[in-house]
Amino acid sequence: MAPIQLSLTPAEKLFRQCLVDCRDEMQSVPGMKDLELRWTGGWVRDKLLGVQSHDIDVALSTMTGLQFGQALQVFMKHHGSKYENEAKQQGFNSEVKDIHKIAANPEKSKHLETITTRMFGIDVDFVNLRKEVYNEQTRNPEMEFGTAEEDAMRRDATVNALFYNLDSLAVEDFTGCGLEDMKNKIIRTPLEPYQTFKDDPLRVLRLIRFACRLNYEIEAASKDAMKDKSIHEALRIKISRERVGTEIHKIMTGPDPYTGLKYVDDFDLYSVVFADPNDDYKVDNKVALGAYDGLRRILDEKPALFLGLKPKENQSLSWFLAAYVPWSESSTKAYTAAWEGIKATNSFRKVLKEAIDYRSAIVEVVDLVGSDNATRADVGMTLRQSKEAWRSHVLYSLLFEVADGDFDMATKRYEKFVSFVHNQQLENAHTMAPILKGNEIKDALGGPKGGPWLKQAVDVLAQWQFNHPKATKQEAIEMIANQKTELGLD
């Protein structure tokens, strides 16, 4: 079989030449003379798929990333202008940044120090070829120099274990399966899957992510190992929740969140991933499946809801809310689980908590609209409470109903609600400026001192203003002046 060649962009060609020239000139540096340079992993895979990547991992056969990075800095001090001028002439980014070291952190499942930089618009990591020797007590591996084959075999998937040799300019497949698996659209581990996942349980989520990102099928033996309870327990206690959350976020922002989240459930990982690992609070994960199915159908089949609630506009938030529909009985538990489970952002958790807290009020106005008994103020005041998150709160309420109910009936009700919001121009209800200021309200009521009644008066005014969108300030003053009894100011 003829070696597979790759077509490089001008920036990639210049970057490659820079690396090779550095090695060839600095032969006196220990480890440089016999150094083999390779680009690895995701860049090679994406290049074969015809997808442009701006991230390149450089694998070094006889040097650490720090050693080569320092040598490259010396080389660029003497010759950098040559490459920068070439970049400028060809019309792409000529910037070359200093190297930066990111320390290893085994307790967070980051086992290797990385040296990073940015050259010619490409984000670069330098790292030596390595093999992993695992300690049975901690399951944190010790890193040693390895061969290219050993480095390929320790990776999470065969399609991520391909190399591009900077001397031969050919793709290298040391697992013997990577190219064939790409052809057949299969995700599998280079070594026996159970031990692969036992060594690093995060690989379970990584394989799920790559399967739904690439639209590949996870092979049977890997699927079986991903269901193993001991692997689940290792994922729960060994891997930092930040790393778990990062993988889940990438799934939710990827091209096929539905398949990724369904895989999480298929492998019985829902509680392992989304729950607080220190809390035995139980939820029904099958409700999440119903929410996933509902969200997918809304995205595919319901243009009115798609346009009105905009679930694609913040895709990751929409799928995050769907994942936490089973927690709808306790906003406090949901808020905590979202942090302790996947380290969700404060803004995501706030939206989730309020979506649960406001759900009954949203259902009430949806029912009023459905029975044609809603006023503009009924809906406006509810949306005003939710502020800019109202679409997400309404979406959560809808997903709760479709998760374990009649999809067509629920979506029909919410379509009518969204149509009411649009027709009444209430999309920005939360930004409606009060027609009267605080002092004007006080003057209208005879100048009483401030107190709890003022907030109540502001709400009365807002409700009236929603129902009288064209009212004048004088009409508002007359209305609020007649509210003394209701406000307890007589």
Image: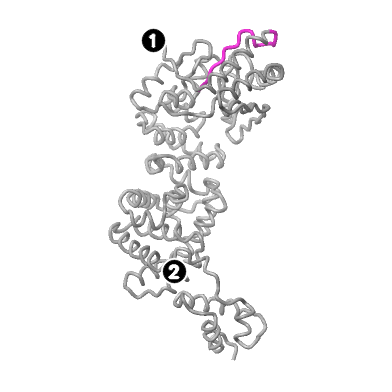
421 sits to left or right of 489? left
Tell me the magenta residue range: 28-40
Q: Position of residue 141 (x, y in %)?
A: 58, 26
Who's the residue at 47% across and 30% down the image? 197
**In the shown orientation, is residue 216 left or right of residue 78?**
left
**In the image, residue 2 above or below residue 192:** above
Q: Which mark is residue 361?
A: 2
* Disc nearer the start of the sequence (2/1): 1
Is residue 344 among the parts visible in the rendering? yes
Look at 39% across and 39% down and name the residue there. Answer: 267
Q: Is residue 67 among the parts visible in the rendering?
A: no
Residue lying farthest to the front in this orientation: 89
Residue at the image position 37 percent from the left and 10 percent from the top:
1
Q: Secondary structure at mark 1?
A: loop
Outermost residue to the bottom = 490
| Above or below: residue 461 compared with residue 226 | below
Residue 447 in picture, x, y percent from top left? 65, 86
Q: Amino acid at mark 2?
A: Ala
In magenta stretch: residue 469: no
Q: Name the spot of residue 445 as percent of width and height, x first.
A: 60, 86
Residue at 49%, 29% in the rendered image? 53
Nearest the viewer among 98 and 127 is 98
- Prevalent SS, magenta region: loop
Classed neighbour count for the residue bearing mark 2: other residues with Cα under 10 Å, few (<14), some (14–19), many (≥20): some
Q: Which residue is mark 1?
A: 2
Quarter of the picture containing the C terminus is bottom right
Residue 226 relative to residue 85: left or right: left
Is label 2 in contact with label 1 (beta carbons under 8 Å)?
Answer: no
- Looking at the image, which is closer to me, 276 or 458? 458
Q: Nearer the viewer, residue 85 or 74?
A: 85
Residue 171 placement, left or right of 91 = left
